[in-house]
Image: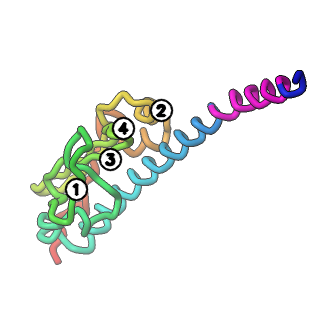
Amino acid sequence: MIELIFVIVIIGILAAVAIPKLSATRDDAKISSIVANTRTIAEDAKNYYTSQGETNWLAAKVTDVTDVPLFTDAACTTQATSSTVFAGTPLFICDDSADVLDITSTTASPVTITLKQGSSSSTIATALTSDKVFQALTDGTTGKVTTLGGQKVVR
């Protein structure tokens, strides 16, 4: 009986050590995914604009520009569909119903895209405030503005 109690105590100690490590690993994976998606959005928008020109950019659907899952509201309840226009529509990357990245683009020349940290105060959003790559991509809550294609691109 005493041996059984020792085994149970040892299993409890191992679980107490392993579960927080597992949770931290999962959070790190989510942060890496959001950073990768942020980089992908910026590159996809630049590439689409450069290849298609300003006229096609203004009518481009979200699914034409990128395959990153985006939402059309900060509450993360409405996912962008194949009919959602990318240019001029506020878009969001979300994590567990929390807005972690805001994406806005202009429809006037010069066309710009702005990436800024979302308004969420979730655990992941808080961790993103100290991620150097994410901060470089977004300039935090200030927002990083990128001009697409420089001069007007016509195809």
Badge 2 amino acid:
Ala
As measured in the structure, the alpha-carbon distance from the residue carrying label 3 to the one carrying label 4 is 16 Å
Marks 4, 2: nearer the viewer: 2
Crowd class of label 2 (few under 14; some 14 to 19; many from 20; radius 10 Å): few
* Residue labelled with disc 4: 139
Query: Which mark, by number, is residue 93?
Result: 3
Q: Which residues are magenta?
A: 5-19
Residue drawn where x is 22% and y is 74% of the image: 52
Work out whether 104 lies above or below 85: above
* Residue labelled with disc 1: 80
Badge 3 amino acid:
Ile
Q: Which structural element holds mark 4? A: loop
* Residue labelled with disc 2: 127
The quadrant the N terminus occupies is top right
Crowd class of label 1 (few under 14; some 14 to 19; many from 20; radius 10 Å): many
Among the two numbered marks 3 and 2 on one chain, the one whose residue lies closer to the N terminus = 3
As measured in the structure, the alpha-carbon distance from the residue carrying label 1 to the one carrying label 2 is 25 Å
